Amino acid sequence: IDYRILHFIQNDARMTNTELADQVGLSPSPCLRRVKALERAGIIRRYVGIVDATAVGLPISAFVNISLHSQERKALEIFQSQVQTYVEVMECYLMTGSSDFLMRVVVPDLQSYERFADKLTRIPGISNIQTSFALKPVVYKTELPLDASVPSGS
């Protein structure tokens, strides 16, 4: 039942509790108790609206691979603390493989990306930056595949 609740909330967080309860086959009170428990447990972290980036003037998505000179804790912390302040950075991950970080950046145009890249190069310890620009989204999901996380036989 919790996974069904999460499915519906991930697809329409504005659904009323009564509508949600109908969808998952519960009465409203037990449904609300389950939702509140999921929130308290940190499974539901927050509720957001998904905005069309192009519609608000941010049509350029760039994926940026960054390598550092050193993977010492201090170098990683400096980089991480700095990129958290950049509003253009939508996601940033510490990676395994050939680069240390991968980030997704959104900007209105290439000149704005150039200004962002200039800020990025000022972070001490960066040895390499490689940028790829997205031509078009092929798959973009916000719903986690919860059915895939349930072991078979459960």
Image (cartoon, rainbow, N blue to C red):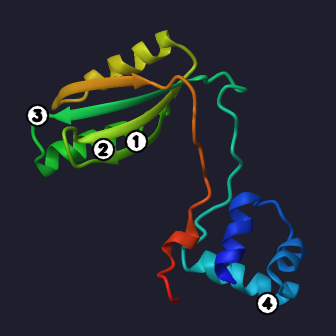
Q: First in sequence: mark 4 or mark 3?
A: 4
Residue behind mark 1: 84
Q: First in sequence: mark 3 or mark 1?
A: 3
Residue behind mark 3: 69
- Of tags 3 and 2, the one toward the viewer is 3
In three-dimensional space, the C-alpha distance between marks 1 and 2, rounded to whole angstroms, equals 6 Å
- Of tags 3 and 1, the one toward the viewer is 3
**Going by the picture, which residue comes out furthest to the top?**
111
Say what amino acid the circle numbered 3 marks. His
Say what amino acid the circle numbered 2 marks. Gln
- Of tags 4 and 1, the one toward the viewer is 4
- Of tags 2 and 4, the one toward the viewer is 4
- Asked whether the beta carbons under mark 1 and mark 2 sit within 8 Å of each other, the answer is yes
Residue behind mark 2: 80
Residue behind mark 4: 30
The percent position of residue 77, horizontal first and vertical second, equals 23, 47
* The N terminus lies in quadrant: bottom right
- Asked whether the beta carbons under mark 3 and mark 1 sit within 8 Å of each other, the answer is no
